[in-house]
Structures are given as structure tokens and as C-alpha cells.
Amino acid sequence: MAVNNSSTGKDDDWKSQLRPPPRDLRPQTSDVTGTTLGLEFEDMGLPRGLLMGIFEAGFERPSPIQESAIPYGLQHRDILARAKNGTGKTAAFVIPVLAQLKLDNTASRPSISALILVPTRELALQTAQVTKTLSKHMGVEVMVTTGGTTLKDDIIRLQSPAGVHVLVGTPGRVLDLAGKGVCDLSSCGVFVMDEADKLLSVEFGTVVEGLLAYLPPQRQVMCFSATFPVGVKEFKDKHMSSPYEINLMDELTLKGVTQYYAYVEERQKVHCLNTLFSKLQINQSIIFCNSTNRVELLAKKITELGYSCFYSHAKMLQSHRNRVFHDFRSGTCRNLVCSDLLTRGIDIQAVNVVINFDFPKNSETYLHRIGRSGRFGHLGLAINLVTYEDRFNLDRIERELGTEITPIPREVERGLYVAVGGETEEEREASFLLQQQLTAKDRAQQVQVQGQRQRDQLQQQLALQAQAREQAQREAHIRVLQLQQQGMAMGGRR
């Protein structure tokens, strides 16, 4: 049931009816706690239904980017915001988007009031889910549309009587729907770009320009990202009206992420990875490779080592990518090997270790990769396997990001990436059970792998025996032919 009445939050009776998740008592860094205004969500004049969704999602107080962006977003100001990965950027634009919706129940079919554009399909699914979670008490219709799915389903959804209030999608698919006249953006008063630097790159820039032609001239534009190259300034000058600029990047890397490198030869990488798996206390890890072929090969190697592992890359079917993403988020598997497909915005709280199996070639990619750990001010570990050929990239990335990547010690201090203290007995027990469950899966995987190895070895032995028999038969046949030829030659001489 929708609840739309505005509230300043003075009446707390409604709070007692909420069912928020258990409080996260892990320590957090100043990346998410270092607010300056001391605002609470209830001080922002948000609708009651939205406040209910915020608190039921487990939000307690705004992070610095939320405190800075939400009040200006509510004023319908254009916003250009730069903040670190994993500091709450998604809620910083979703909350003002939802708060400004005019939910007219008398309308025959709601029109699209807000468009949220993101560069990847996985990020679109995640952003749509956050939007649905926060608006669960508002009666808002949220739709996600991405490439790799059938247009027919999207067309049916857009033309359904329920309509769509908020559309979340990737640029190509939204432009396709708008160009076919199926997606009406003429009443879309709010346009949001998450990971704006990627959306304004050569890959997507012309598509975004084409999409803007379908939006009304009087619109609110909000751009959020961790990095802002020259293309963003050009877009600001052309399409934004006196935007309120936010820059919370006093330093580029997250305070809670400790960065190490291990100097190895290429042939030593898998052995080094196996050592890390055995020594580190990994909740979940994401392992990055620089090509899709290496993603699949490494995932196979990890499985052969006896560890549970999924993989994901851009050449997979979208349905397979969605399944892997969903299962990994739900904790079905401990390790995920992927290409740079999942470097942007993906938020999986259980990931505490990121490993660059292949070291990235530029600082922007490195920054987004390591931002998959240490989410929302928590602790994380970034480990880079660096070869002789990577040494110049390592030095350049350190200089460009103003950070230090140190050699990995023999023993990594557990407190650097695992929350110590601050947990209740129930949380410790739940964490222990999860670790046992994942360890049991790894053991089962090891047993399965060992059994498969034994079967493979037996088949290989049988194949070698069959080859030996065939070889012996061929040699015997050749010997018989040679003897016959010799006999014929002797008979001819007689």
C-alpha cells in the first residue's frame, strides 16, 4: 500500500512498524561517516513512504555524498557530483528522484518521470533493485531495460496499464525504444547519469547525445561518477544549467582498502593465487583478468585447485551473466573471476578481497576495480600480481592516484580486511556458519575435482594402452609386409 504524505519525521509511531535488517556494527571509515552538516534523512522533508523505504533498507544516516547531493536534488538543481566508489552515490540520486515524483492515481497510465542511465547491464539491474527497495511504500512503478533481452517484453511493459514512473536502462536499449516511439520521454523531467565518465566516453557519447533529443528542454540533469575526464566538462557546458558541483575526492582511493602487490613471473601466478586462497580469510573475492579468454582459463584452473568459482564476461549470454551475478550476490559461491565488466558500481557487501590477476594498464580501471572491496566504508584488501612488464604501469598508477601500493608481507594482518569486534554474538555465529557453508562447498568441490581427476587419469591410461596396442599392431603389420616384400625380391632374383 502506497504512503505518500509528507513528514518531517517528528512522529515516530510509524517507525515501530518497520522491519529493518539487523544493524551493521562493523567499523566504518570517514569516507561514509565524515559528514559536515549533521543532517538526518528526517530533516530533508522527504515523503513518509520514502522514509519508510530508506529505514527498512537499513539506512541510518546520510553519507557525505548523500548529505551534499540530496538537498540540492530536491530543489530540482542540476548536479555534477564526484565521489569515491562505494560511498552511497546510488541513493544520493535515487532518493531525490523518488521524492520529486508526482504520483497521480487518477491518471489513466503514468508517464515516465525519471530516466536513470547506467553503462552496464549488471549495474542497471542493481540500480533498479535499489530504486524498488526504497520506493516499496510509495506505489512507484520501476522498469529496467538493457540490451541482451527481447524488445517484445519491454514494449509490453511500457504499454501496460500500470505504466512506468522511473526507467533504469543502458543507453543503446533506451535509445532504441525511444526511436521506435515505444518509450515516451517527453514528460521525463529528471535525467540521471551514473558512472557519467563512462557514459560520456567515445563508446557511449553519441548515443547519449541522441537520447537527449527525446527529453524535454526543461529537465533536471544529475551526473555522478568517481572520475571526471574532459568529456564531462564539455557535456556540462552544453547540457547543464548552472549545476551544483560536488567534489568529495580529497584522495582517490578508499580509506578502508589496503593495497599490496606481489612481484611474480607469469607462470607463477596460479601458484601465488592458490597460496593467497589458503592464507587469507576471504568472505568473497573478485578476481580480474584483462581478457575474456583468460577469465575462462583462470576460472577452470581455480576449479581444478578445488575452490568454488564462477566467471563472467561480456561475451556470455545475458541470461547467464544475470544468473552468475545473482548467485554470487546471494553467497552461493566464494570467488568470481571476471573482466572489467563488473568494475563499475557493482555493490556486493560481502566482498572483502579484490585480486588483480592481470594488472590493469590505466589508473581509472585500477581505481574502479579495487573499489569492489571496502564498500560503504568497510575494510577491504586489494592484491595485485605484478610481472616485470607491469612495473612501469605500477609506478605510473601510484603517481596518478597519489597512493602507495606496498609489497605484500608474509602474513597479512587480519584486522586490515576482516572486521574485528563490533559484532554481536548472533552476527559472529551467522558469519561462522556462512564461512562453514562456503568451506563445505569448497571441500565438496575438492572431492568432486579429485574424483574427476582420477577418472581422467584412468581414461588417459586406457587411451594410452589402446594407442600402444594400435601401435604394436601397426608395427606387426608393417613387419609382415616387409617380410613379404623381401620374399618376393628373393624369388625374383632366383
Image (tube, grey):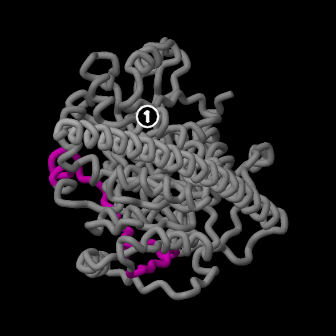
Residue matched to label 1: 318
| x and y percentages locating residue 200 in the rendered image | 23, 48
Q: Is residue 450 or residue 263 the one in the foreground?
A: 450
Q: In which quarter of the image is the C terminus?
A: top left
| x and y percentages locating residue 138 in the rendered image | 60, 33
| x and y percentages locating residue 447 in the rendered image | 70, 55
> Going 49% across and 53% down the picture, which residue do you hit?
300
Q: Is residue 312 or residue 70 the one in the foreground?
A: 312
> Going 49% across and 66% down the picture, which residue do you hit?
354
* Residue 29 belongs to magenta span: no
Identify the magenta region: 234-263
Q: Residues within 10 Å of mark 1 (few under 14, many from 20)?
A: some
Q: Is residue 219 visible?
A: yes
Q: Quadrant of the N terminus?
A: top right
Q: Is residue 357 or residue 172 the one in the foreground?
A: 357
Q: In this view, does 49 lie above or below 72?
A: above
185 with respect to 446 (left or right)? left
Q: Is residue 325 above or below residue 179?
A: below
The secondary element bearing badge 1 is classed as helix
132 with respect to 259 (left or right)? right
Q: Is residue 435 or residue 417 the one in the foreground?
A: 435
> Going 15% across and 46% down the picture, which residue do you hit?
238
Q: Quadrant of residue 49?
A: top right
Q: Which residue lies furthest to the front in this view?
A: 494
Number of labels in the image equals 1
109 with respect to 391 (left or right)? right
Amino acid at the residue labelled 1: Gln
Q: Quadrant of residue 246?
A: bottom left
Q: Is residue 32 visible?
A: no
* Residue 243 belongs to magenta span: yes
